[in-house]
Structures are given as structure tokens and as C-alpha cells.
Amino acid sequence: MHPHFCRKLCRTSFRSVNRSYPFQMRWFGFGFNAFGQIYGQDQLLEGECFENEQEVKVSSPIECTAQEDRSDCRLKTDCQIRASWSRRASLYLNGDSCVCLSGFVSNDSCGNPVKESRGCKDAIISESYLTLAFSDRLESWDLQKKETSPSWSMEIKTEPEISGTPLNLPLVPGGYIATKTPLYRSLSPHLRAKSLALSSEHAILLSASGTVYTWGLGSHGQLGHGGLTPEEEPRAVEALWGMPMSCVATGGWHSVCISDGGDLYVWGWNESGQLGLPSRGLRKATQQKISQQQEESPCRDASTSTAEEPQEGETHEEVFISIQAFPALLDITPSCEVSTVSCGCRHTAAVTTTGDLYTWGWGDYGQLGHHTLISSDEPQRVELFKEQQMRVVDVVCGAWNTFASVVKEEVAGP
């Protein structure tokens, strides 16, 4: 019997964003890989998962592989990734577009184009459903069943004047696709929704004017209204008024957004340092690991301990934040701006305009990409890409893992 992994409300966030790049992209993944959603799925039998820690926990970026490399999808280089807790969906948009699945899927589906996805324009995946957007319809397929018809579908009647507007899941005409039934939820047209990110408990919407709206449960401050109460309807985040935003993302219990000027704002739960703010819970857990290591190595020199005692005249009064109920500005690095961001269940990843990837938060499965299983409440650059002269152009987080899209950095000649 293979181990059971708790998924407690840690479904990946759905973020509606579409990008295309003139250079050939390569996708790298790190973090939770129990079902081969990053690499090695061809080594597993149907229904099995990896048990070796080195295969389950990928702590350094590795290029994503799957059986799809042997399918007709391999010729299509314009690939986008969608991720859930146990699966990865690769959306190929060049030529005859299609979706290929990796991770917790049947052997006959692994790596092969999902036949129902031929011609789709966008896709999102959860633990229960694969939703496909076509130019004339939407379809949601139940991944727990072998169906011959979609569980839910809707025709799209596109107005001629907006026929060139791309679909942007989970947003759909008149509403959005939720993470659980009922799948279709309506939205007021007055919101003028541009993009939407969903967790299992709350939602964050970006309007065409750059205003941010949130609704859902607020028990961890994830709505950004200053309290912990829920909101049944979209409510503007007043603390961000007057600052147009360009990107939104959400984790299990935290939210983030990027301003037009490239500033990053964070709010919600910070127990694992996922906001990049000082976390008492994380520091305690780190100290426990250090103590355990010292007990296992009694001959270790005490001077190597990372704990510091305050010097004379100094006090240890660092402010720790468990819940940040209002948006807070987070400086990742003072020298550059943030271009895009994504959230896992309890970690965050951001790409800067210089092509660097920074990660922080919960790191027990290696999802921070720093070649360790250590969590961090401080944004740290993933050094491998810089060392390999790679420029990060996009990032997508699953619940417990991270996927980064990179292009080769052009090196100026002599």
C-alpha cells in the first residue's frame, strides 16, 4: 500500500493568464513528485506512486519529462503548464492544439494527447476536473470517471466585435469555472473582469481598470479587507485603491498582486512564511530542526549554531506576523520589478523583469528549488537558472510544487 498524502484544502490556484514568447521555452519543475508529475511517470504502474524520498521530493529544478515526449505533441514548442496537487496538464497551442496529462492519471492517458482536447484554446485542471475551452464551447470532464461525454458543457456565442479576444480560464462569458460544483458561477458584468485566481476557499479578481476584488472565506485574512470575516460577493480591496494592478494570484490561504509599476503586495496567512514576512511558526520549526540535528550530532561545535544572542544594548524584538489582513508591500529585491507571480498551497514564486525566479514559504517537498527541504520567510533567488544562463519568463505553482518556464539567455559577443 502506497503512502497517503494529505491534501487538506491545498488545491492549486487557478490563474487566468496567457503568454507567448518568440523563443523556444523549456519547462523545469521542482517539489512534490509522488505521481511523476514532474518526471519519471513511465517508471510507475497505474495507481502507484513513488515512495523514495529523493523521487517524491525534488529540491532542485529538473527539466520536465513525460511520455508525451514520444507523442506527436513533442513538435509543438508553444507549451503552457497547468498544475494541481497530483497532476500536470501541458497545453500545446501550435498547430493542432491539445492537452497532455502527467501525474495521477491512467496509463493509457499518460503523456498521450487527450482526444477530447483537440483544438482547445485553453485548459485548467483540478483534482476532479479537466476544463477545456474551445472557440465555440466549454467542456468539463470528470477525471475520476471514464466518461464518453463531459460532465458539464456550455456553448459560447462570441460577439463579432470581440471575436479576437482570447478565452482566459477560469473566466468564461458571464462568469467563471469554480473548483467544485456547481462548476459555473455567474459574475456581474459591472466588474469588467480581466483575470481571476481561485483557491478552494476564496477568489481574487482583477478588473480591466486594475481594481482588485476578493470574496469567499476570510478566516486567515486572505481577502485583504482588514478582518477575518467572509464575503459572499466580490468586494474591492480598498487598501489598493488608486494603484492599478496587473496580475493577481492566490494560494491556499494567502493572496498576492503586482502593481503596474512592478511592486508586489501580499496578504493573508503567513504561518509558513508564504508572505515573505517574519513568521514565528516558521522560525520555531527551523529551530526544532537545528536542535534535532545537534542531538543527532553531539560532537558538533556549538559555535556553528545559527541562533544568535542579542549583543549588549540590543533587544530581540522582531515583529512576527501570523496573519496579515491588509495588503503589505514586499520588496523582493530593490534593483528590479516583478513581472509575474504564482502561489502554491503555502509557498510563493515570483519572476522579476531581469529574468530571475524568487521563491519563499513552505519548502518541505523542495518546492522552493534551493536544493534543500527548508522553508523560508525571505524571498531567495533560485540560483540554478542564473548559473545555467537561463532567463525565467513564467512560473506556475501546483499545490506543493513549482514549474518555471525558461529561455536561454543571450550572451553578448566580444
Image (cartoon, helix red, strand yellow):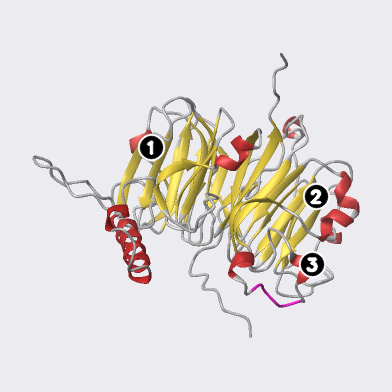
Q: CA distance from mark 3 to mark 1?
A: 41 Å
Residue 228 place in picture, x, y as percent: 30, 56
Which of the two residues, 1 or 266, is positioned nearer the viewer here?
1
Q: Element at badge 2?
A: loop
Q: Assess whether mark 1 and mark 2 are in contact (beta carbons under 8 angstroms).
A: no
Mark nearer the viewer, 2 or 1: 1
| Whether residue 133 is visible | no
Residue 266 found in image quarter: top left
Q: Which residue is mark 3?
A: 42
For the record, the magenta segment spans 46-50
Q: CA distance from mark 3 to mark 2?
A: 26 Å
Q: Assess whether mark 2 and mark 3 are in contact (beta carbons under 8 angstroms).
A: no
Asked whether residue 47 is drawn in magenta, I would say: yes
Q: Amino acid at mark 2?
A: Cys
Q: Which residue is mark 2?
A: 120
Q: Amino acid at mark 3?
A: Asp
Q: Point out the residue furthest to the top here.
A: 414
Residue 3 found in image quarter: bottom right
The answer to whether 38 appears left or right of 135 in the picture is left
Other residues around mark 2 within 10 Å, as few (<14) / some (14–19) / many (≥20) = many
Residue 33 place in picture, x, y as percent: 63, 63
Other residues around mark 3 within 10 Å, as few (<14) / some (14–19) / many (≥20) = some
Q: Which residue is mark 1?
A: 330
Q: Residue at x 72, y 45 (%)?
A: 80
Which of the two residues, 210 or 260, is positioned nearer the viewer here?
260
- First in sequence, mark 3 or 2: give its number: 3
Residue 250 place in picture, x, y as percent: 49, 50
